[in-house]
Image: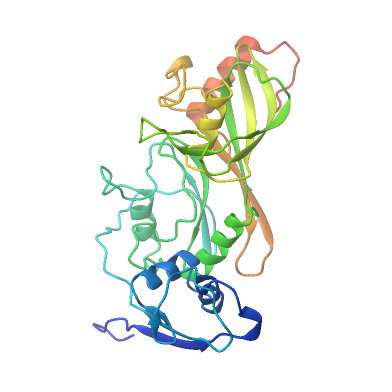
């Protein structure tokens, strides 16, 4: 692209094959256009930029053999995102993805109240070619709460982002957390299977509610330290605040959690004791599975060491 030139709108036309008959139009279009996610296709349909036989449709409309799909893909819209030279701990990077170890206190993407100083701003400074596509969340595949530390993977371009999102939806991404909870769990390992949705009264919070989205958290006990328990929690789904909500729901809230915890600030914790310490996924480049680990950051490690000195029996080895 020459200096000063603007990206052009893309126009695509294709016909529905016999094997695609009966499928939703958004699913067919997403499968035919590898660099578009299904959610992006749905946006194009809602904007009237994807038609079937020259007519606007709804995303769930079934297609028939021979249907003509015409798609207009507008160029990325300009955004107000500002690259900022915020230090990042990069664990791994290649042409498709980057794995970072997010510190506590760093917001993932701009939002009301946090227009600057986010992970996205830092990523744009380090990777100027990061796909934006008019979004305030370029490359972001999954999120961590501001005060949760640990590993995240970012897609560096649209095709990689789409492949990572597909792995997420299919449950192929391994996400494990170290969590310190209040009390002792009834079993050494188990599953918390409870739907999560918006709290019926406190709309900024999540809760276990009958009409919520399915949510499953697997756990195993690593250590019991006095009145507390160190747990490894693995996400089978990825709902907002899932680990925090699930453990609070069973009566063992995350220590230091100011929203769902019963003992916010206990043990001198500056934040919730929640760290994404293991992350595994298939690389978009060759499909090879890679797994990464992150040690506990100093603020959480200090609290854990203090508890071990106080409560662990002499000669007993730590679970981790």
> In the figure, residue 284 lies in which quadrant?
bottom right
> What residue is drawn where x is 56% and y is 82%?
64
Between 269 and 73, the residue placed more toward the observer is: 73
Which part of the image, by quadrant, shows the C terminus? top right
Q: Is residue 26 visible?
A: yes
Q: Residue 279, relative to residue 243: is it above or below?
A: below
> What residue is drawn where x is 72% and y is 11%?
313
> In the figure, residue 218 lies in which quadrant?
top right
Q: Position of residue 43 (x, y in %)?
A: 39, 67
Q: Residue 67, relative to residue 148: is it above or below?
A: below
Q: Position of residue 8 (x, y in %)?
A: 32, 84
Q: Residue 182, relative to residue 86: is it above or below?
A: above
Q: Residue 149, relative to residue 155: is it above or below?
A: above
> What residue is drawn where x is 57% and y is 65%?
163
Which part of the image, by quadrant, shows the N terminus? bottom left
Q: Position of residue 93 (x, y in %)?
A: 53, 60
Q: Is residue 95 visible?
A: no
């Amino acid at each position: 692209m020459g200096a000063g030139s603007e990206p052009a709108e893309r126009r695509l036309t294709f016909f529905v094959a016999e094997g695609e008959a009966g499928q939703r139009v958004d699913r067919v279009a997403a499968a035919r256009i590898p660099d578009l996610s299904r959610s992006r296709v749905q946006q194009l349909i809602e904007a009237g930029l994807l038609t079937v036989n020259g007519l606007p449709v709804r995303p769930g409309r079934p297609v028939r053999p021979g249907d003509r799909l015409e798609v207009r893909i507008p160029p990325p819209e300009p955004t107000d995102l500002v690259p900022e030279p915020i230090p990042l701990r990069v664990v791994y990077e290649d042409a498709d993805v980057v794995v970072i170890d997010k510190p506590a206190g760093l917001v993932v993407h701009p939002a009301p109240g946090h227009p600057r100083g986010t992970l996205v701003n830092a990523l744009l400074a380090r990777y100027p070619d990061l796909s934006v596509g008019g979004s305030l969340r370029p490359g972001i595949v999954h999120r961590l709460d501001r005060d949760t530390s640990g590993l995240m993977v970012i897609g560096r371009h649209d095709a990689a982002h789409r492949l990572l999102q597909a792995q997420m939806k299919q449950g192929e991404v391994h996400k494990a957390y170290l969590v310190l909870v209040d009390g002792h769990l009834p079993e050494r390992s188990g599953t918390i299977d409870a739907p999560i949705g918006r709290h019926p009264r406190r709309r900024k919070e999540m809760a276990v509610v009958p009409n919520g989205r399915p949510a499953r958290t697997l756990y195993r006990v690593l250590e019991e330290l006095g009145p507390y328990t160190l747990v490894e929690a693995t996400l089978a789904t990825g709902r907002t605040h899932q680990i925090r909500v699930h453990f609070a729901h069973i009566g063992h809230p995350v220590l230091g959690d100011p929203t769902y915890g019963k003992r916010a600030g206990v043990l001198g914790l500056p934040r919730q004791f929640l760290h994404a310490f293991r992350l595994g996924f298939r690389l978009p480049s060759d499909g090879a599975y890679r797994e990464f680990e992150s040690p506990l950051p100093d603020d959480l490690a200090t609290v854990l060491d203090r508890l071990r000195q106080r409560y662990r029996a002499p000669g007993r080895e730590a679970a981790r």
